[in-house]
Image (tube, helix red, strand yellow):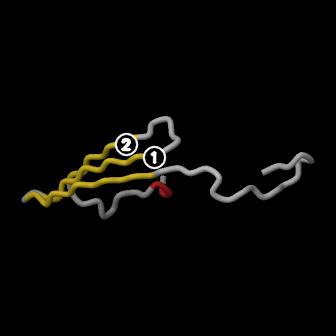
Amino acid sequence: MRDEENNAAFSEPFVKQFYIGAAALVWHSPLGPVSLNLNYYDNREESWSFFFNFGYTIFNKGIYEL
């Protein structure tokens, strides 16, 4: 953070708290796995996200591989 003289200064740790939640449901069907995922990220424009996956995600790209 910046202080009054525009120099770098430390802030107090853990001043703001944010919450993250996730839930997943997986079913191993005869054709392959099926999963439903629900995520919650506090302090975002779209807090809720929902994912549906069919099959294995072994080679799925991660967020850092975009």
- Dot 1, crowdedness within 10 Å: few (<14), some or many (≥20)? some
Question: Distance from label 2 to label 1 (Cα)?
Answer: 8 Å
Q: Residue furthest top?
A: 45
Are the residues flagged by discs 2 and 1 in contact, CB closer than 8 Å? yes
Percent from the top left, x then y, of residue 50?
Answer: 32, 43
Which numbered marker is on residue 7? none
Position of residue 5 in the picture relative to residue 30 (left or right)? right
Marks counted in the figure total 2
Dividing the picture into quarters, in which one does residue 34 lie?
Answer: bottom left
Which numbered marker is on residue 49? 2
Which label lies toward us, 2 or 1? 1
Which numbered marker is on residue 41? 1
Helix, strand or loop at mark 2: strand
| Three-letter residue code for mark 1 | Tyr
Q: Residue at x 29, y 59 (%)?
A: 57
- Dot 2, crowdedness within 10 Å: few (<14), some or many (≥20)? few
Q: Residue furthest right?
A: 5
Percent from the top left, x then y, of residue 56?
Answer: 24, 60
Percent from the top left, x then y, of residue 52?
Answer: 26, 47
Position of residue 34 in the picture relative to residue 15 (left or right)? left
Q: Residue at x 27, y 55 (%)?
A: 24
Image height of 52 relative to 64, above or below: above
Sequence-wise, which precedes: disc 2 or disc 1?
Answer: 1
Position of residue 29 in the picture relative to residue 5 (left or right)? left
Q: Residue furthest bottom?
A: 58
| Three-letter residue code for mark 2 | Ser
Helix, strand or loop at mark 1: strand
Q: Residue at x 32, y 47 (%)?
A: 38
The residue nearer to you, when weighing 1 against 63, is 1
Percent from the top left, x then y, of residue 45?
Answer: 50, 35
Q: Residue at x 13, y 60 (%)?
A: 28
The residue nearer to you, when weighing 13 against 56, is 13
